[in-house]
């Protein structure tokens, strides 16, 4: 059964008339929306990076802050959204800055839990760049907590994944966290 027909069935199950004027196109719109929101399943890291890794002797920390992201909670199919902060320590190779945002986007456009999302971004960049370290911090609001269940509208989940020197060297990790705090 096509996704459009499944959405039509959902409308019927909740007691709606999918043939009423305001809902006639809803199954198609919902199916298209779901495909858009989960398009990350049809992307891979090689395509997203598209060769935008360059030899460069730069070896200081690189941080891209406040990358907005939107994802769907795999438990309730409700959105969660927020900001990702990504840092890496080059090892003779740098990446086109927009590619970091594209990696965040690729993994966030899948059914997710924030913990896994954070981990996937860090590991994918660390491996692709063969970096000396990667740090990722994500902060998000989850509609599954805000509009149902405990209904806590002001709560945020913060997750982190630190690899390489970000994990083994407390000074490197603290520099990253300090730069996130100091520039807000």
Image (spheres, grey):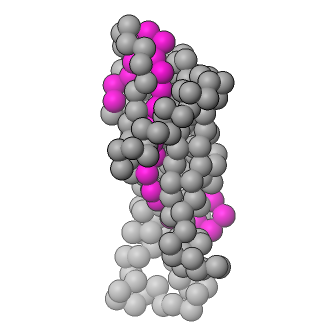
Q: Is residue 76 rendered to the left or right of residue 26?
A: right
Counting from the top left corner in percent of width and height, residue 29 is at: 39, 69
Counting from the top left corner in percent of width and height, residue 47 is at: 43, 28
Taking depth in this image into account, of 45 and 182 the one nearest to the observer is 182
In percent of the image, x 40 and y 90: which residue is there? 20
Q: Is residue 54 rendered to the left or right of residue 91?
A: left
* Quarter of the image where one finds residue 65: top left
Q: Is residue 118 above or below residue 82?
A: above
Write the start and end of the magenta stretch as one range: 74-97
Residue 46 visible at all: no
Counting from the top left corner in percent of width and height, residue 77 is at: 58, 66
Taking depth in this image into account, of 139 and 17 the one nearest to the observer is 139
Q: Is residue 182 rendered to the left or right of residue 16?
A: left
Counting from the top left corner in percent of width and height, residue 146 is at: 54, 75
Taking depth in this image into account, of 102 and 33 the one nearest to the observer is 102
Q: Is residue 164 above or below residue 17?
A: above
Q: Is residue 56 above or below residue 128?
A: above
Residue 68 visible at all: yes
In percent of the image, x 42 and y 62: which residue is there? 33
In percent of the image, x 56 and y 27: which residue is there? 171
Instruction: Pick the quarter of the image with the N terminus.
Output: bottom right
């Amino acid at each position: 059964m096509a996704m459009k027909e499944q959405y039509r069935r959902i409308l019927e199950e909740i007691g709606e008339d999918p043939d009423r004027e305001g809902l006639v196109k809803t199954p198609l719109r919902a199916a298209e929306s779901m495909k858009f929101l989960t398009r990350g399943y049809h992307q891979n890291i090689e395509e997203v990076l598209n060769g935008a890794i360059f030899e460069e002797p730069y070896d200081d920390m690189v941080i891209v802050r406040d990358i907005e992201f939107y994802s769907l909670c795999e438990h309730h199919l409700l959105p969660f959204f927020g900001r990702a902060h990504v840092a890496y320590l080059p090892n003779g190779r740098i990446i086109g800055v927009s590619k970091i945002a594209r990696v965040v986007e690729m993994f966030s456009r899948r059914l997710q839990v924030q913990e896994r999302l954070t981990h996937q971004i860090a590991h994918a960049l660390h491996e692709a760049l063969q970096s000396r370290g990667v740090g990722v911090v994500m902060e998000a609001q989850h509609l599954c907590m805000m509009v149902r269940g405990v209904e806590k509208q002001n709560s945020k989940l913060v997750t982190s994944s630190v690899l390489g020197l970000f994990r083994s060297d407390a000074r490197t990790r603290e520099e990253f966290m300090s730069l996130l705090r100091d520039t807000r």
